[in-house]
Image: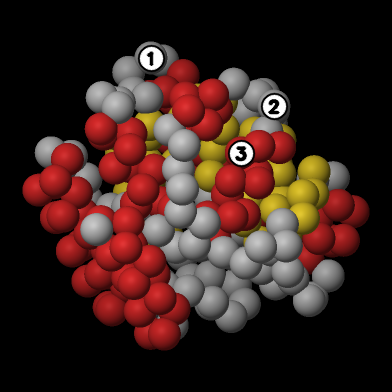
Amino acid sequence: MPDVILPVLDEAEAIPWVLGRMPSGYRPIVVDNGSMDGSAELAASLGATVVTEARKGFGAACWSGLVAATEDLVCFMDCDGSLDPADLEMVADPVLSGGADLCMGTRVAEPGAWPLHARLANRALALELRRRAGLRLRDLGPMRVACRQPLVDLAILDRRSGWPLEMVLRAAAAGWRVTEVPVAYRRRRGRSKVTGTLSGTVRAIRDMSAVLR
């Protein structure tokens, strides 16, 4: 039964839909990162395992979820309704079949779901990954699947927005087989805190630039 790590900051509007779409046998671990809208209580009432992480930052929430996970296979995805948990099985399949060590969901966005500034920043990062690590990825996607203990052993240090990039860089350095499969990307539910805003994208770029340095 894979564990699904869901970092959450004020996502009460999306949580019921996300948890309701979780594939059978996939256990949601909601990591609340300081929500003020009752996200944690709502998730618990809907049957999710809830972990509280007081340190602010996407990476801090992801790390806490990874520590709390108990299954051999772990999944990460945003909990804002932009990604469909039903796609997790498709992303997990290359890892489960032994064909990859890390599989990422490449976002195929519906109109208006992915702001231009975020897409351009993502493309630049993908090109930088190709240059530095030889990985031909089209997207630094937020839906990803890998085995838990090898992820722990990567010893990812970033606790902010650089976490996703550092995971891929360390995986490549460790010789992991990294692949990607397309997943639908929809308009998020509720207010965006990171890549849906220009200031959030600037913060993410700053954090990821620190990882690259």
The residue drawn where x is 45% and y is 43% is: 156
Inspect the image, locate mark 3, and give the three-letter code of the amino acid beneath it. Leu
Q: Quadrant of the N terminus?
A: top right
195 in relation to 131, above or below: below
Disc 1 element: loop
Whole-number angstrom distance, CA of label 3 to CA of label 2? 8 Å
Q: Is residue 196 visible?
A: no
Inspect the image, locate mark 1, and give the three-letter code of the amino acid beneath it. Gly
Residue 70 disc label: 2
Residue 66 disc label: 3
Disc 3 element: helix
**Number of numbered discs present?**
3
Would you name the residue on which mark 1 appears? 98
Of 156 and 85, which appears nearest the observer?
Answer: 156
- List x then y, in percent, for residue 142: 44, 53
Disc 2 element: loop
